[in-house]
Amino acid sequence: MILKKEFYFIRHGQTDHNLLERTKRGDHPPHIPLNQTGISQAKAAEPLIARLPIRTICASPMKRAQQTKEIVTARLKAPHHEIADLGECCAEIWNEMRELGMYSEVPSEGIARVFMDQVRKGMNEALAKPGPSLIVAHGGVHWALCCLLGIQGHEWAVDNCEVIHFVFEGRWTAKKLIR
């Protein structure tokens, strides 16, 4: 179970590695930086993030998430926390998740289940802090969140620097915020 607290999610900005993934899915080394497009995406998202009622900022330790966090939170006066369990999954897990497709039940076994447990732990660590929180992480984390929360009517694949608002009102909903 994930704590039932409102939060915002943003996927990191584009990297050169993201461009390669369109033709071949590979592993996600932690040191990959944003490219110029990713920096521009994060700068474009910053005014929206600055208007949100964010009290805590939590991010993956991976370089692209950390760079995105620094850009999008430039005007926020909230504590920053690095949470290892918000890191991206490996190619093998991505492939398993693609095979499973979008569904509302968490897999009972396999490596995707291990990743889901990691994301659950990381989210509970983030949501235990004063909220609403901003989560700066990865596409795989967003996918796992949608599965764990039973999200319906929301695209599970998220573009770079899209901002998503998650709210629990009897059930979880997710809504993409428009800049």
Image (tube, helix red, strand yellow):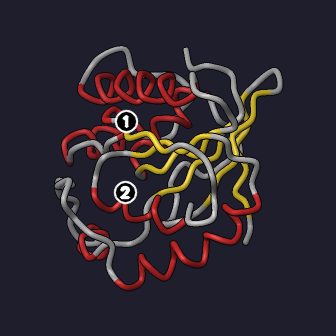
Q: Residue furthest right?
A: 169
Q: Which residue is mark 1?
A: 83
Q: Nearer the viewer, residue 95 or 32?
A: 32
Using the rendered view, name the quadrant where residue 100 is placed. Answer: top left
What residue sits 30% from the left and 16% below the top? 109
120 sits left or right of 175 in the view: left
Quarter holding residue 49: bottom right
Whole-percent x, y for residue 90 in the image: 21, 44
Q: Residue at x 60, y 78 (%)?
A: 44
The amino acid sitting under disc 2 is Gln
Lower sequence index among marks 2 and 1: 2
Residue at image point 48% right, 44% down: 80
Where on the picture, by quarter, is residue 36?
Answer: bottom left
Disc 2: which residue: 66
Tell me the kind of residue under disc 1. Ile
Left or right: where does residue 49 sit relative to residue 123? right
The residue that appears at 82% across and 26% down in the rendered structure is: 169
For the C terminus, the quadrant is: bottom right
Quadrant for the N terminus, please.
Answer: top right
Q: Tell which of 5 and 19 is nearer to you.
A: 5
